[in-house]
Image: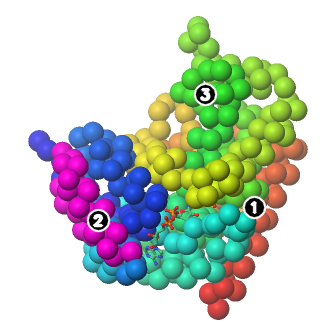
Amino acid sequence: MAKDPVRVLVTGAAGQIGYALVPMIARGAMLGPDQPVILHMLDIEPAAEALKGVKMELIDAAFPLLRDVVATTDAVEACKGVNIAVMVGGFPRKEGMERKDVMSKNVSIYKAQASALEKHAAPDCKVLVVANPANTNALIFKEFAPSIPEKNITCLTRLDHNRALGQISEKLNVHVSEVKNVIIWGNHSSTQYPDVNHATVKATNGGEKPVRELVANDNWLNTEFITTVQQRGAAIIKARKLSSALSAASAACDHIRDWVLGTPKGTWVSMGVYSDGSYGIQPGLIYSFPVTCEKGQWSIVQGLKIDEFSRAKMDATAKELVEEKSLAYSCLN
Ligand code: NAD
Ligand code: LMR
């Protein structure tokens, strides 16, 4: 029997991530090849014509899984009955701008959209915040949508996770699918801590080998690897004069797919989720942790050994999130 369609909201759908993301969703990359979807696309008035054009292209692509498209500049209409909300709308970082510069523009958007979703989305709606500053926008969203369970509000650090997998794969000349269990701790910013202490590569005998053993160059892993992942967003802006879009859209699909359909056995992924105090991180912050997902629920991987080097980096990125939180509140006042 055919499944009932799932309603997926994409805000900022006329933007560059939106343009890459909506066809991926309509092709099943987010919810699976047998899951019909209804796309809800929201943008603002100046982008209304462009949004209409995206809708026309979705119709022209004749996607078998796409049951309907709602394209609107009305937040209430956009949020009605949605099961999944991917919050991409906002002001992107341009060359030379720090993420903090975009803060004041974006937190007030997230406060308003939290209220709209809280009132009009399906009660079990899962929320993924992509727009920067992603962790802090998600925190503001959580605080202004108190009836949406905290567990349902997350932010995107899967792009950073995938970037870390990509760097290890290039270094070791192995396929990226053979590398797993890197961790992104903290903020989706240049203070994030990409950690390979528990990461492994599939061995030819079917077992697994630690990345630290295979790279055998702690200096690279502790310096260049970390800064490359931390600065990858800025490097892409420098090269494209635009921020990452296809990789961000693909990571958003990975994030929701694993959250809804589950992570493979023995594998974790990184998600920005509210801290319950695990690993000594201040409760309530939206912080990126290693998580596994089952039956639509994420859980933070517990019991990983944290050395002194990691501890300092995990605390530094937490400190930045505490500062961003107070800056966000000062922008809202
Ligand atoms: P873009 O400027 O191309 O698109 C943003 C869209 O949002 C525009 O169409 C704009 O009209 C729309 N918008 C603005 N205010 C809105 C509102 N109130 N409601 C609905 N839509 C609104 O930007 P982009 O390149 O698609 O990037 C979107 C966001 O994602 C940026 O904040 C960017 O920094 C962020 N980003 C995050 C990650 C991540 O990994 N978390 C990666 C890449 C980009
Ligand atoms: C990215 O990581 O590519 C984006 O968040 C762009 C940015 O502002 O760094």
Q: Please determine whether, in this image, residue 241 is positioned above or below residue 212.
A: below
Q: Earlier in the sequence, mark 3 or mark 1?
A: 3
Q: Quick one: SS at disc 1?
A: helix
The amino acid at mark 3 is Val
Labels 2 and 1: the sequence-earlier one? 2
Q: Tell me the residue at 77%/38% (across/down).
A: 225
Image disc number at residue 318? 1
Q: Which mark is residue 40?
A: none
Magenta segment includes 70: yes
Residue 283 shown in magenta? no
Amino acid type for the residue under numbered disc 2: Gly
Which region shows up in magenta? 47-71
Q: Tag 3, which secondary structure?
A: strand
Q: Which residue is mark 2?
A: 53
x and y percentages locating residue 297 in the rendered image: 45, 51
What residue does disc 3 label? 179
Q: CA distance from mark 2 to mark 1?
A: 41 Å
159 and 293: which is toward the camera:
159
